[in-house]
Amino acid sequence: MNTPRLVPGAALVTVPGRGLALRTPDGAFLRVDTGEVPAVELLRLFDGVSADTEAPRDESGALGRLVEAFQDAGYVTANAPRDRPGPRPPLAGTTLLLLGDRVLTEPVARLAADVGARPEPTDPDRLTARAHEAGSRCAVVWCLDRPVPPKLWDAADALARKGTAWLRCHREGAHAWVEPAAFDANDVTSADVRMRRLAATPAHRELDAYWAASHGHDGAGHTAVTAAYTAALLVGDLVRGATDPPHLLLRRLDLRDLTLTTHPILPVPACTPMPTAEAAP
């Protein structure tokens, strides 16, 4: 049966002593003047009328005009089948290549599948070839429950220049770092993040040595809760990037109390190489 339906996120509520109000998908509340239409008839219509229930009568056409007003305002999809499939998931048709530690890749895979992606585990040696095979509807998420070994992500930094979305996260002690997503050649790479972080700390020599060290036990690692939080941030970036420009924020999640801090970050511009000794005046 066809029946008008409120758009996802919209709802009608009965306010004591004030009649109906519409909660919009953005969270605003609008007063609803139903005129000569009893409020209960509008509620019954939008709730859906089963096949064995008499539909609200609309002999004057007032109910139809009221529904059209909702439709014109963008809050109703008119004459939509009740069993019509929902909106297309935002990542439908996207192949998601996953690398890294299972404590993080498993929740990323579950959440990404819920929004339409096809998660596929892969390995570093096959990454470039798999991204090429997957084509333009491909994204790479690389998650580490440990610091990033030197040069591990260097090859992956070239993915965005070839049209493959590139997201990553890693852990340093009690902090998880979620880097900005890269969707094209102008976005932030992991190399940019390393340079910006080194430039922003007086302990740049120590930080560089920490990254280069042979890491042993480096903290307790992710729990199910912190891994789910981190995975949600990554999948949220993918969903946002499907329609909007990515935000240029480096995020640090404190795994002890789930405090999230954000740091604006920009790509490091290319510069002219230093002259060699032979070329120097």
Image (cartoon, helix red, strand yellow):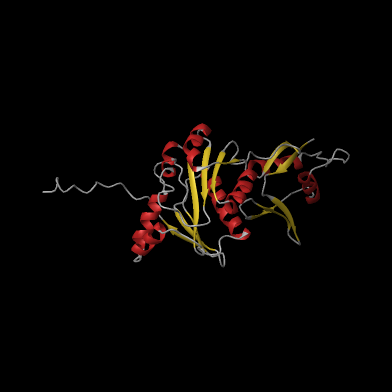
Seen from the viewer's position, the closer of residues 66 and 48 is 48
In this rendering, the count of numbered labels is 0
Looking at the image, which residue is at 42% across and 57% down?
264
Percent coordinates x, y for residue 115 in the rendering = 62, 44
Residue 46 lies in what quarter of the image? top right
| Quarter that holds the N terminus | top right
Query: Left of 25 or right of it: where is 145?
Result: left
Vertical relation: 268 (above or below) 165: below
Percent coordinates x, y for residue 47 in the rendering = 78, 46
Seen from the viewer's position, the closer of residues 102 and 245 is 102
Q: Residue furthest left?
A: 281
Looking at the image, which residue is at 58% across and 49% down?
105
Percent coordinates x, y for residue 56 in the rendering = 83, 42
Q: Residue furthest right?
A: 52
The reply to whether residue 74 is visible in this rendering is: no
Residue 229 lies in what quarter of the image? bottom right
Looking at the image, which residue is at 44% across and 59% down?
263
Seen from the viewer's position, the closer of residues 168 and 88 is 168
Percent coordinates x, y for residue 130 in the rendering = 51, 35
The reply to whether residue 180 is visible in this rendering is: yes
